[in-house]
Image (tube, grey):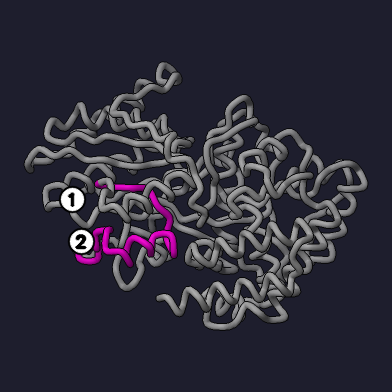
């Protein structure tokens, strides 16, 4: 079986020149997404098919016959609607080339797929394969015995020699490899270099310098940080950096592992800084109820100067006509240098037969091949989470290599909603909103988060 993979992007394709999108680039523990929007198909309906390079199409078609010799199988895959063009187009090619395998794709938005998969797990109706994130989001399916234990398969097929150790570790939960790694992602502060240059701003080395540049932006009518509170995870990206700043690396790791109390001075201090940022106008008006998709619009239009995003952001901006030559990034000045990271993967139903698992793995490897990436580059995260991965084109994705190189040098911590179980992350998200709305103090929030942790630990 082929061992080359490509990661699927987590950013939604923005319609109307970056004015809308289907899903977020980050993981989330919220399960309020609309699952009724799922669309099942085995045919490609992309209006851009005529724009595909015939040579790249031919390259994909040349590898589409995967040589499956087992019994005829019908498989289902649940993926993200933000990647629908590639999912549908590639699945159609695959189905046509393999008469004994038929794959049906269903597409959901970012939070909708979480809701759909949890509902399916509770009703014993999981698809054959589904997109998921690592950490606690993938852990749910391990704990409930619905995802295939790939530990033996991974060892037999040399996954430790194929995938980078960081992504493989995030897909290894409760001592089992529980998914096929498709991407490894790190986050930083993306910023508009043209806006910084216009107002004489420099990349901050300290949090005091960061706050000073935010004040300068406000004085000139520019909202400093594009963020949105719907479903919680986008605002969380900044709060976790504030906790890294106030707690330091070791204590932050303990907080994320829930081995020390969140009802502590470091958490209160971080949430107090966040409260100050809210009161100072560092975020857009009404951000608590805003959709994270709108952060792309504000950044692209120049009404906000910064956005907390990962290396996928280059592809998203470039794909929608933004000028990436005026976009760069810097690490949040948290004092440790670490950035947050997360993994994506494909999980497989524990009920698959041997033939179904073989066919499902062949399909997954085809969908995550270099050829598939070349044909639908903007539906994938780059670079591949491989030991020998090549970096994307620096002209169209100029920040990817520096982000990943930086993370290798300075280290990472797991993004909070993959470190936390959903029961705890949901409380964190509610506390974020309450602090922003003035109905909760940082002290009260720290107490509530710790209470949620203790409730979760008592129940598990």
Task: Please state the horizontal and vertical placement of residue 232, each as a whole percent of the image.
Answer: 61, 54
Task: Please state the horizontal and vertical placement of residue 309, each as a whole percent of the image.
Answer: 62, 50
Left or right for 203, reference 158: right
Query: What is the number of the mark on residue 153?
Result: 2
131 falls in the magenta region: yes
Give the number of marks.
2
Give, as a single range, the part of the protein colored magenta.
128-152
Q: Residues within 10 Å of mark 2 (few under 14, many from 20)?
A: few
- Snapshot quadrant of residue 291: top right
Mark 2: secondary structure: helix
Q: Is residue 389 shown to the viewer in this render? A: no
28 falls in the magenta region: no
Using the numbered discs, state the Cα–Cα distance from disc 2 to disc 1 in whole angstroms.
Answer: 10 Å
- Snapshot quadrant of residue 394: top right
Q: Label 1: which residue?
A: 357
Left or right for 312, reference 90: right
Point 56% across, 49% down: residue: 311
Marks 2 and 1: CB-CB under 8 Å?
yes
Task: Please state the horizontal and vertical placement of residue 10, each as a whole percent of the image.
Answer: 49, 45
Point 61% across, 71% down: residue: 449
Pick the front one: 263 or 310: 263
Left or right for 49, reference 432: left
> Which of the two labelled residues, at mark 2 and mark 1, occupies the earlier sequence position?
2
- 340 in relation to 4, above or below: below
Q: Is residue 451 shown to the viewer in this render? A: yes
Pick the front one: 95 or 258: 258
- 160 in relation to 130, above or below: below
């Amino acid at each position: 079986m082929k061992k080359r993979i490509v990661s699927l992007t987590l950013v939604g394709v923005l319609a109307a020149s970056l004015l809308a999108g289907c899903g977020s680039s980050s993981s989330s523990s919220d399960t309020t997404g609309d699952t009724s929007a799922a669309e099942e198909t085995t045919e490609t309906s992309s209006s851009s098919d005529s724009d595909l390079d015939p040579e790249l199409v031919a390259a994909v078609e040349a590898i589409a016959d995967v040589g499956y010799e087992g019994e005829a199988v019908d498989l289902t895959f649940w993926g993200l609607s933000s990647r629908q063009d590639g999912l549908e187009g590639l699945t159609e090619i695959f189905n046509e080339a393999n008469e004994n395998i038929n794959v049906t794709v269903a597409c959901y938005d970012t939070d909708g797929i979480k809701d759909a998969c949890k509902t399916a797990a509770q009703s014993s109706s999981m698809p054959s394969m589904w997109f998921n994130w690592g950490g606690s989001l993938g852990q749910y399916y391990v704990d409930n015995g619905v995802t295939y234990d790939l530990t033996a398969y991974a060892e037999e097929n040399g996954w430790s020699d194929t995938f980078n150790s960081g992504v493989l570790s995030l897909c290894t939960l409760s001592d089992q490899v529980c998914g096929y790694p498709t991407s490894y992602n790190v986050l930083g502060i993306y910023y508009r270099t043209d806006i910084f240059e216009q107002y004489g701003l420099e990349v901050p080395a300290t949090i005091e310098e960061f706050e000073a540049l935010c004040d300068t932006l406000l004085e000139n009518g520019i909202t400093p940080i594009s963020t949105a509170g719907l479903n919680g995870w986008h605002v969380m990206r900044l709060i976790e950096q504030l906790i890294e700043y106030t707690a330091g690396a070791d204590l932050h790791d303990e907080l994320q592992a829930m081995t020390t109390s969140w009802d502590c001075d470091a958490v209160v201090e971080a949430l107090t800084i966040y409260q100050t940022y809210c009161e100072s106008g560092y975020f857009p008006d009404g951000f608590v109820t805003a959709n994270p998709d709108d952060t792309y619009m504000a950044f692209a239009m120049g009404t906000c100067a910064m956005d907390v995003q990962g290396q996928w952001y280059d592809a998203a901006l470039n794909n929608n006509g933004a000028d990436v030559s005026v976009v760069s990034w810097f690490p949040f000045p948290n004092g440790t240098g670490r950035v947050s990271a997360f993994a994506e993967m494909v999980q497989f139903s524990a009920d698959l037969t041997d033939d179904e698992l073989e066919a499902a793995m062949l399909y997954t490897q085809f969908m995550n091949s270099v050829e598939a990436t070349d044909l639908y580059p903007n539906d994938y995260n780059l670079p591949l989470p491989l030991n020998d991965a090549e970096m994307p084109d620096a002209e169209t994705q100029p920040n990817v290599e520096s982000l990943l190189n930086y993370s290798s040098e300075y280290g990472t911590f797991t993004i909070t909603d993959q470190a936390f179980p959903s029961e705890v992350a949901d409380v964190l998200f509610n506390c974020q909103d309450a602090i922003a709305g003035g109905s909760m103090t940082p002290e009260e929030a720290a107490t509530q988060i710790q209470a949620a942790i203790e409730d979760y630990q008592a129940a598990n």
